[in-house]
Image: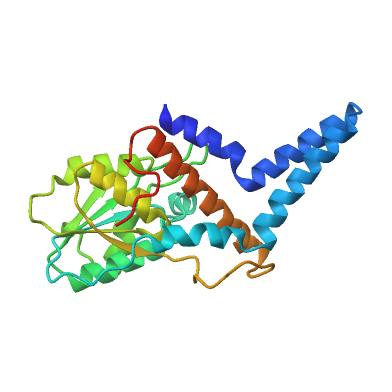
């Protein structure tokens, strides 16, 4: 139930969709002669889109998440690497059978680099299909094609392809791997996603060393207008809002112990 409610809620609350719904509400209000209500809806839609696309608000919201876990020094020995899904274009790969990467593809590239550096380490890819309406291939089903092409042997791979969100990533991976005391596992995911992911793996009883990748901010954006192109700014704002809402929802539901987990 949590999965479905979160997806439905996010469909309505993400900045672009919310602005569209507010514009539609404004148009309906205008049709029925409610001019003040129509103007309010239109102004709110404009404010949401302009702040998200034309300002550095999204980067300023995302940067604290990215800074929460610094990338540590590599340990001498690594027994395994867990990479969370979210780096592939699932719909395209399902149709074409390739391994097209999206903006989060750094997760898979970094995993291949780490796997070559630690040739004895197991590599766990955790990620099924987490969409309600879109049909696509889960990352754990696509990853063997890319990782194999990059020299990571199939015998090293452990594939968890049932999870639909980060909570299920942690729980299902823990059940599948059953890590032993004293083992060293790296957790690879996007830097902005690491606080929630690390907290969930800790809660599931799977100790990991966070290895953040896929940074979206420089930390030097500051407050200002037009610091990036509007499409990228809107995407960053959407990611930031989604991640902060996710942290709050997971904390309120008891799935993580703190609203802003850190090291």
Q: Closer to the camera, 102 or 155?
A: 102
- Residue 67 is situated, as x and y percent measured from the top left of the image, at 41, 63
User: What is the quadrant of the C terminus in the image?
Assistant: bottom left
Image quadrant of residue 193?
bottom left
Q: Is residue 3 above or below residue 117?
A: above
15 sits left or right of 99 in the view: right
Across and down, in percent, residue 142 comes to 35, 54
For the rendered model, the colour scheme is rainbow
Q: Residue at x 84, y 30 (%)?
A: 29
Task: Determine the residue positioned at 52% across, 53% down.
Answer: 240
**Residue for point 89% across, 26% down:** 32
Q: Nearer the viewer, residue 257 or 191?
A: 257
Examine the image and state in which quarter residue 114 appears.
bottom left
To which quarter of the image does residue 250 belong? Answer: top left
Residue 121: x and y, percent?
15, 63
Q: Is residue 30 visible?
A: yes
- Is 169 situated left or right of 39 in this image? left
Please identify the quadrant where the N terminus is shown: top left
Q: How many marks?
A: 0
Indicate whether 188 appears above or below 242: below
Drawn side of residue 188 relative to residue 44, left or right: left
Residue that lies at the very extreme toward the right in this rendered image: 33
| Relative depth, front residue between 108 and 14 | 14
Residue at image location 45% in from the left, 45% down from the top: 136
Residue 103 in view of the camera: no
Q: Residue 152, image x and y in percent?
A: 23, 66
């Amino acid at each position: 139930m949590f999965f479905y409610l979160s997806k439905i809620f996010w469909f309505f609350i993400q900045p672009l969709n919310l602005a569209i719904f507010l514009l539609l509400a404004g148009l309906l209000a205008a049709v029925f002669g409610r001019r003040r209500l129509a103007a309010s809806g239109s102004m709110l839609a404009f404010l949401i889109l302009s702040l998200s696309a034309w300002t550095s608000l999204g980067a300023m919201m995302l940067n604290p998440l990215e800074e929460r876990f610094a990338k540590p020094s590599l340990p001498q020995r690594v027994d395994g690497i867990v990479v969370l899904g979210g780096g592939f274009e699932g719909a395209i790969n399902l149709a074409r059978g390739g391994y097209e990467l999206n903006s989060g593809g750094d997760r898979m590239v970094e995993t291949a680099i780490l796997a070559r550096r630690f040739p004895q380490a197991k590599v766990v890819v955790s990620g099924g299909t987490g969409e309600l309406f879109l049909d696509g291939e889960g990352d754990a089903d696509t990853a063997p094609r890319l990782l194999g092409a990059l020299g990571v042997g199939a015998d090293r791979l452990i594939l968890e392809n049932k999870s639909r969100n980060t909570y299920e990533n942690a729980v299902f991976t823990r059940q599948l791997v059953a890590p032993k005391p004293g083992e060293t596992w790296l957790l690879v995911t996007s830097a902005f996603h690491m606080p929630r992911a690390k907290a969930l793996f800790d809660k599931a009883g799977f100790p990991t060393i966070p290895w953040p990748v896929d940074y979206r901010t420089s930390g030097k954006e500051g407050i200002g207008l037009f610091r990036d192109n509007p499409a990228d700014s809107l995407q960053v704002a959407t990611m930031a809002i989604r991640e902060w809402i996710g942290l709050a929802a997971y904390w309120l539901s008891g799935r993580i112990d703190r609203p802003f987990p850190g090291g």
